[in-house]
Each structure stands twice: as C-alpha cells, then as structure tokens.
Image (tube, coloured by chain):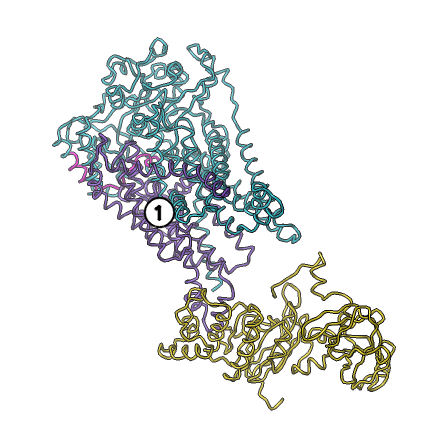
Chain colours: A purple, B cyan, C yellow
Amino acid sequence: MKKSFLSKLINAPYILWSAIFIVVPLIIVAYFTFTNKNGSFSLENIYEIPDYTGIFLRSIIYALVATAITLVVSYPFAYFMSRTKVRTQSMMIMLVMLPMWMNLLIRTYSWTTILEKTGLINSFFGLFGLGPYNLIGTSGAVIVGMVYNYLPYMILPIYTSMSKIDKSYIEAAKDLGSSSFDSLKRVILPLTLPGIISGITMVFVPSVSTFYIADKLGSTKTLMIGDVIQKKFDIDVYSGIGASLSLVLMVIILICIVFMNRFSDSEDGGIIV
Amino acid sequence: MKTLGKIINALIFIFLYAPIAVMIVFSFNSSRSTYVFEKFSLKWYGEFLNSTITITAVKNTLLLAVVSALIATVFGTIASIGIYNLKSKTAKGAIMGVTNIPMMNPDVVTGVSLMLLFVFIGRFLGLASSLSVYTILIAHITFNLPYVILNVLPKLRQVGNTYTEAARDLGCTYSKAFLKVIFPNIYSGILSGFLMAFTLSLDDFVISYFTNGTGFQTLPLLIYSKTKKSVKPDIYALSTVIFVAVLLLLILVNSIKAKSEKQQKTKRSSKAKNIVLTVVSATVCIAIIAYSAIPSENYNEFSKKLKCKYTTSLAGSTLNVFNWGEYISDGIDDTLNVIEAFEDTTGIQVNYDNFDSNETMYSKLKSGAVAYDVIIPSDYMIERLKNEKMLRKLDYSKIPNYKFIDKKYKNLYFDEKNEYSVPYSVGKTGLIYNSKMVKGKVDSWSVMWDEKYKGQVLTFNNSRDAFSIAQFMLGQDVNSTKKSDWKAAAQLLKKQNKVLQARVMDEVFTKMPGNNAAIAPYYAGDFLTMYDSNENLRFVYPKEGVNVFVDSLCVPSNAKNYEAAMMFINFMLEPEVALANAEYICYASPNTAVVNNDNYSLKGNEILYPKKKVKEQYYHNIDSKTRNYYEKLWEEVLLS
Amino acid sequence: MSNKKNILELKNITVSFDGEKILDDISLSISDKEFVTLLGPSGCGKTTTLRIIAGFLEPDSGDVFFDGEIINSLPANKRNVNTIFQRYALFPHLNVYDNIAFGLKVKKVPKDEIKKRVKEMLKLVNLEGFEKRSIAKLSGGQQQRVAIARAVINKPKILLLDEPLAALDLKLRKDMQTELKNIQKQLGITFIFVTHDQEEALSMSDKVVVMNEGKIQHIGTPQDIYNEPVNAFVADFIGESNIIDGVMLDDFKVKIEGVTLQCLDKGFKTNEAVDVVIRPEDVDIVHPEKGLITGEVTSVTFLGVHFEIIVDVNGFKWMIQTTDESKVGDKVGLLIEPDAIHIMKKSKYSGLYGDYSSFSDEMDEISNPDVEIVSEED
C-alpha cells in the first residue's frame, strides 16, 4: 500500500511537468491552427495548407534522398568498422561522434567555403580546367548538408546493432556454406535491421524538419518546410498558418514513425532511439 | 575486401572532417575572409577572447547546459523510478508515450509550441515579457528529460526488484536501499543521461531560438546571428578551441578507459568514477577558463573624450537593447567596444540582442514575448509602431547630444515632430557589380534582367526590397496601394527568374567578393565592406531611383528602464561613439560630429555621401491588405 | 596405415594467441563414421582444435588433411563439415524452417527439394509441425534439435559438436546423449564431439581424446582411458582415482604404503618410482586384521547407491566407494585385488592429483582470491 502511494507521489511532479510543457503546447498549436486572428473557430489556416504542398513534398523528397544516402554510406562503414580491432573501433566511434559536438550551424556554414563557385571543390576541378560548377544553392548542396549533419545518427545505431551480433551467427552462416556476401545478405543484414530502422528514423525526422541547412546551402528554390515555419513565426508570433504547418509536419513525422515501427519488433512500443 | 573497407572508411572520415578542417584553417587567417586564405595569424583568437559578447555567450551556454542537465537528471531519475514502479500498464504506456513526444517531434515544432505556451501564459499573467532566461531553461529541461529517462529506466529494469528486496531483508529502509543498492547500480545510466542532456543542451539551437528571452544569448544563437552576415574567423577560432577541448577530453576518457581495462583488478565502479571525475573536472576547467577570460579593458582614457557627463546613479540596473546584427562597434580589430564602454561609464548592465528584420522585431515586441528598453527599427516600422502606440515619447532634455543630428534627418515623415526617434544610421540601396565580369556602363537596374549575365545575377531575398527594384523600373511609387501596380511589378520580377543565380541577403558578403556572382543589389555601406576584399567591385545608384532608409533609436512603450534608455541614446550620439559605430557599420551617419570629423575614414566618401543628388524614396508602412496582397504575389514569383 | 579409412588427419598442429600456445603439436587421425570426443578441462584447446577442423582458424604450423588433401586455408563455407555451436547460434530472425533450410538456400538447392529435406530432418529430430515456430519460443532441447537438423541437412562428412549439451539440464542431457548416438548411427557420418564432461565422453564415444594445456594426453577407447590412464592427469580427470606413490619392485610386484601388492603390470625398471591408480570402487573395506593396508575413517557420506568413505592411511586420504557402512573413527583394513591396481609411469602431473585430503581443485580455486574463475572456454 505504502509503496504504491509513494510511487504515485513520485510521479505527480513529472506528470504535471509533461502535461504543462509537452501536452498543453501541442494543444495550443492545434488551437492556433483552428482559429483565426480574432480567436474564433476557423478553417482558414487549413485551407492555406495546400499552397505549401510543393514545399512539403520537396522536404520529404530531400529527407528521403538524404536518408537513403546516409544509409548506403553508413552501412558499409559500420560493417568494416565492426570488423576492426576493438581499440580501433572505439577510436573510430569517437571520431564519428566528435563532429556532433561542434555546432551544427558552424559545420553547415563551413560547407559554403567548400561548395562555393570559388570554393575548394571548384578550385580543385579548376586545376584540371574543369568547372566551375554551380554547387551551392542547389538541392544537391542541401542534401549534402543534411547527409553530413545526420550521418553519425545513422552510423551509430547500425554499428551498435552490428557489434551486438554474436560472432557465432556469422560463423554458423559460414559453416553452412555462405560466402561473405551470403552471410551479409542472409544473416548480418536481417540482424541489423533494428539498427537500420532506428537510423532511418533518426535521420529522416530531423532532416524533414530541418531549418538553416536549406537556408544556408540552398536557395529560395530549395526552401524546406522547417525554414517556412521558422519564417512564419519570425514575422508573426501568433502565426496561424505557421501553427497549421507545424501540425501537418507533426502528423507526417508521426506517420513515418508508426510506419517504421511496423518494421521493428520494439518491445517498448515507443520509438526506437 | 579489407582495402576496400579501408578506402570507404577513409573517404567517410574525409567527408566528416572536411568542414572542420576548413574551419580550423580559416581560424588562422589574417584577413576576415572565410574564402581566401591570406596569412597565418592568431588575431581571431585574441578577438574572440576579447569579445564580451562571445565570452558571455559561452558562459551562458555552459551555465544553461549544466543547470538544465542537472535538473533534468535529478528530475528524470525520480520520474524513472516512479514510472518503473507504476503498476498499471496503461498509465505506464501513456506516460512513456508523452515522454517520447519531445524526442520524436521535430525541434521546430517543439520550439514553436513551447514559445506559444510561454507567450500565452505571459499574456495571461500580464507579464511585460513572457520569454526570459527561465523559459529557455524550462525548454531545455523539457527536451532533456526524455533522454535521462531513456537512459535510467532500462538500468532500473536491469537491476530489478531483487536488490531492493535483498537490501530490505538486510534491514534497509526504502530510501537507504535506494541510496546504497539501487543508485550505485543505475549510476552509469544516470551519468550517461546527464552527459547526453548536457551535450544536447550545449548544442541546441532550434528550441533556444524560439524560447530565449531578453539578454540571454547562447553560443548557438550567437553563431546563428553571426552567420546571418558574413562569418568572421573569430567564430571559427572559438569553434576550433571547442573542437580541441572536446578532442582532448575524449582522448583522456578513452585512455583512462583503456588503462582501467588493462588493470583488471580495478573494479568497475572505480572505472566509472574515474570517467566521471575526468568529465566533470574537464567541464569545470573549461567553465573556469571561460569565466576567467573576461576581458578587462580600461575605459578611463575614453571617458575623458565624452561630451556629456554620465552619472552612475543607475548603476546596477539593466538595460535591454534590441538591435540589428553587426550594427554596433564591438571591439573587434581594435575598435571601440561601445557596449562595454557604456557599461563601464554608467555602471548599467546591458543585455544586447539581435534581430534580422523589422518584421521579426515587430512580432516579438507585439506578442509581448520580449521587452526592451531601446530598439533600432527602420523608418516605416517606426511609423507602424507609432501608429500602434507601441513607442514611448523620448525626453529630449536628457539627450543633449541630439544637437549633433543633421537637420536633414530631423522631422522625417515617420516622426514629423521629433518625438519618438533619434536617427542612428542611414542607408540606401544600390547596385553592386563586378567590373571584371560586367562590361560597359552600368547605371540602371535593367542590367539585372540582361540575359548576358544569366546565372550571375543575385537579387534580394526579401519581398519589399525585391519589389522596389521592379517598381523603380516601372516608375511606380514604392508605397503604392494599387493592386495593378504590384501586379505589374510581380510580372516584371517573374521575367527576371531566368537570369537569376539566387535570391540572397547576407550571402552577398561572400558571393560578390568571392567572384561567385557578377551583379547584386544591396545596401551602399555594405558595398564598402565587400570592396575591402575585392577591388574589382563597383557600385552605382541606378538612375530609376533607390530606397533610402533611416534606422533610429526608439523606446518601446513597455520599456522598464526608461532613464537608462535615455542615457544610452545620448551615449550613442557621443561623437566618439558615433564615430566608432559609423566606422564599424560603414553606413552613412546622420551625426554631424561624425560627418565633419577629420578622423572619419569615410569622410566625404562618394558612395555614402554622394555630392550628386540621388533619386530616392522612403518606404512607408503599408496597410495590411496591400501587404498581404504583395506577399501572395511574392510567393508566386518565388514558385514560378 | 590402418585398414579403416582416415577421413581427417591433424599433423603437428600448433596455434598461439598473444604468444601463448593454445595448441602444442597436436596430431590426430579420425576414421570415417567414428564418434570421437575431445575431452578436457576449460582452456585445454579442445574448442580450438574444433575450430581448426571447421575452418574458422588457420593453424600457425602443421597441416589439416581432409580425405587425404591439405585444407589448411580452405574457408569454412567450402568445407564439407558442419558445426553445432555451443549455444547453437540459431538465427534469431529466422523461424525453424528457415534456419534448417539455410544451408540449402545458400547452395541454391531447388525449393521443392529443400522442402522435402527439411521435412525429413524435422522427422529425424522429432520436431514435425514446428516449421513456423520462432527460435525464441523453443525450449533448450528443441533448439538443440533444430541445430542438429540445420547442420546435418547439408550432409556433411563430419559433424562437429561444441559442447552441445552443456546448456541442458541433467535428465534432458542423458536423453540427448542417446539420441545423438542414434542419429550418428542413422546418418553414418563422423561426429567430433567436444565436452568437459567425462561421463558424457565415456558413454557416447568410440574414441576419446583427452587434452590438457594444449596437448593430447591420451587417445583411446573409453575403456582404455578409464582402465589404463597414461598419467595422473588422465586418471584423475576420468572418474575418481586414488593415486599413490609406489615403487615397482619387480614385474607384477608394487610396493605402496610399505606394503607389497600383487599387480598385473610389468616392463618397469626394478625399483622404478611409479604412480599407482586405484579406483574407489575397487577397494573393499574389511576388518583391520584382514586388510592389506589399515587406516582410520575420517568421513562418511551417503550417496544413495553407495557410501563415499574417506580413509586416512598414514596421512594420505583414500576415497572408497562401498555399500558397507562404516563410522567415522573406525579403524579399517583395505583390501585390493591385483586387477584393481594400475601402474603408470611418473609424469609432470605426478603428485598433483589423487589425494582426497583436500577439496577438489575447483573448490580450491573458488577459495583462492588470486584466481579468477573463467567460466567460458576460449
């Protein structure tokens, strides 16, 4: 008896906190979505959403492409990393995580030096009489920015699930006649699926909602929904359309997470982080 | 196979570290460019160490990260125990579901929703400013909590109930059992939760952006405002220092781990303790270094040059200033650090924040999210603020230095009776071009439509300035309320799309000097900054006309420290201060004491102070119907 | 060369890790259809030997012959050998059917045939109807059977079993021993079985290879090994033994504890110091006067089938298993038949084993703070 009372007491502050600072804010977002400037119920913000379909689609496509690239790049990286010596592994993990400690804005900004018309890449091509190519301001630059910033979020979960694989599974596969490729395809890949899925979620979610990256590395033609929302709230704190776009973004993310969770048998039922 | 792996991994590391290498290399650049490396120099390290704003931002960031992570860790650990002991599965599921929200929700949405909540509560409680250091703290705790819980809860599950039961069996009370048995076992989870929270808080930009209040700038926010304009290598220098510090820290932790793994007899707990000790002591070291690096410049000499006497009667009070980014002399390159000089002279503590557009500033003020004592809006925004009764009349008797303001800039349309504003800086739009890339005489905006320069033309990425160019070409009034006028201008802008390389704002600071584009419209003073790094650039005031703007010092109606605001405004008009600002900003000064000063390096500059009359027009506040109309047209232009 | 065909031969195999010799000059030949057990305590190198045969490890020196051909560096997937792993290593992402079919799928065997053969296998291991079951939902015994099916479906010439029964409880272990033996007979292939359980080794094998410290100590049939251990280590490791210092007076005459006994061994030098092995069940307790050797009972434990009695003879403690009860403090006589005495040459293990005055080695280990107990082999 005493214990359950205690646990209720112990939970009360946290429940209160999450109600006020997690649930209520979302209700307020919904409130602004469904009211007009005078505070009465209105669907005008909903009607405006279709104008942003293009930007939503663009954000989703960019995020998908960036996620796909990070996956394709990270998987072999994690695979080879997991096969090196333990000391090397922890060293490499450290090196993968290190850039995450640097400010995202600075890291992103540095890319302009690399990608500009007179930047490092074009100077390099210039040595061979090639270019200059238009790199900055393109969708490619935005995607490179996203891949760069979110790559560790893909590498780490894949590596973790890779290093968790009991070595005997791989030996068993070999023993049963698999070549290295066979055991990669039939054993390692399926066993690292949870890592892949959490990697995809961890890259896709921030990518689709990112702001700043598209702003700095892209152009007005590559603007993403995060930038739009930021700008809406910049010029109007009570932006109804901003609220409605946030709501749509949230729903997209939710759908994505539910969809991804169907692939994994996460026991907690929550998201995998 | 093995070599293939090595190649792939090497390429990825190159990819991961290329931007960081760029950052480190350019932090040692002797010039302010982040594109062209001139000479090795350590000056940017000195600059950031001498910049109060940067150091304060570092301190704030560390303070916020430590405090929010600590609170979140304690709170999150208690919450985890509560959640773990919950009997009901549905309750558990519901709490965990809510806990997950801040993790899966996009940062933008979390930030926006918290901001809305704070503004809502602030309005409800009738607070003058609803956002403050506490709101950013709450926001950080909120997004840190799930990560702590996520680290502690699995440990609790791992430990299970048997230990508690064993401890109880051996005569412990519940709390003692927790301290003696559970805590040591979930300790590593708590620690990693704390570290994760600390890191996230340290690096958070998005949520801080929406929830921070007056005068509490964190490093990411500072960097954001700095990267809005051309990045100077000082921020690279700072980042390099952080990079090296983190690198050393990680190496230290790693080697300790390796050592204790070798010494098999070392027990696990002491290993963990070692790591904690190093992490904590390293963090503390960084904090102490940051704290002790407060620059201590002496302003005694300087104060003798002041025209007015400044009392220290308001010493200890706080003054909140809201200004454009990079719009005040900040002490870099041996200039005067105006804020510090003011603080030193008056004893008033200044909180200095940046905005990047009139509209952003307006919306923040209007919502009551923030409260400031001094703001520096542009002409049309002053008109709007005045109309909406958001400005307070100034007490000119306390601003004797107002006498230095040029008559030209008094009685302007937005403040006809000189009641609300004191001009600070004057600018004009104009056309910048690269003489190596553009041939022939340039005197008209029409060159921006010339197909010869396809892919080399930049234009404004803000609706009003972009429209104004089309309006000047069409000979319209830039403040027209006729829909047909705006429509025609939009048509013209759409035609421009095919020659455009990009729509930019501050990116021109890198694009034009870097020869990345041939033609761009921008503000006259900024041209001078660009010219410093590329002498092939030229500037003209196109014959069709240009926009002129006056940014003025004003006091919002909800200002808390009116007297200090008067003092600050007067101080800003001090010839020495105004000179430093004029030199720093590079815009035309409305201050006669500056314009006629022989020490003023830009005295009589043809571009800032043209002798020939330039055809120019002010923007006025445009009614919301027209504004909405042209904003819609603008979006069409963008999408076409 | 014997007339039986050698399917596998190890010649002078040596393996070191970090400068430590794990296998030291191992040579071993295994005939077709034989059930061979590698027996030894943890760290003796038995699993390493198995891994060399499986192809997970290349020897530093020495050769592995399979059907007369050197296969030292032939990768595991190309060897006609399959393994049952210590904890089975059943793929957790696949169900029973897919686990068993794995090897055939890799070899791109037609689907119909896979289906047929998996069915046969399931029948062989008594798991019909379990096709769709997920691995996590199987009991230890069922997992064991799946592991067998998964390995033998590939029709290997040799099946390697790495302590496959270690994870099962006693009763199930006994049943599986019989079943494994049956399966081996049914399939008619060679089994190489690794265990540290001497009972398991004795009951199942055609041939037992006793290993210690990276060296083969004794190769022989279970009876050979039990009755004629080559040294004190083997004698102690296989069953319980009293190992007493003795002197060979002449052929068939050995002197222990000051008493000369008749024995069946010969060929030693006169007065050669030897180790004398006497199994506890071969000693009879009689009246002191009737015994050849006398001693005092120091402990009596009732074990159901018999009593385990420790008798102190001049400070050396004998273990005796008998159905006759004695009391602590009784003076007793010990009677030993000549065929119960086995004489061994002195080896480096002499004097280390066979005295019951102390606890077992394992007990010594857990009481010693300087020794770290390693439960996992390799």
Rendered residue at 52%/59% (across/down): A84
Q: Which residue is mark 1?
A: A207
- Horizontal arrangement in the rendering, residue A208 relative to residue C125 (left or right): left
Q: Nearer the viewer, residue B541 or B557?
A: B557
Quarter that holds the C terminus of chain C: bottom right
Is B385 located above or below residue C54 in the figure? above
Q: Estimate the x, y position of residue B414 in percent, counting from the top left.
A: 24, 18
Quadrant in which the N terminus of chain C is drawn: bottom right
Label 1: state its secondary structure. Answer: helix
Q: Mark 1, chain letter?
A: A
Magenta segment: B489-509
Front residue of C181 and C25: C181
Q: Nearer the viewer, residue B355 or C342?
A: C342
Residue C199 appears at what percent x and percent y? 63, 75
Residue B493 visible? The answer is yes
- In x, y percent, where is residue A232? 28, 35
* Among the 4 quarters of the image, the one containing residue C210: bottom right
What's the residue type where badge 1 is placed? Answer: Ser
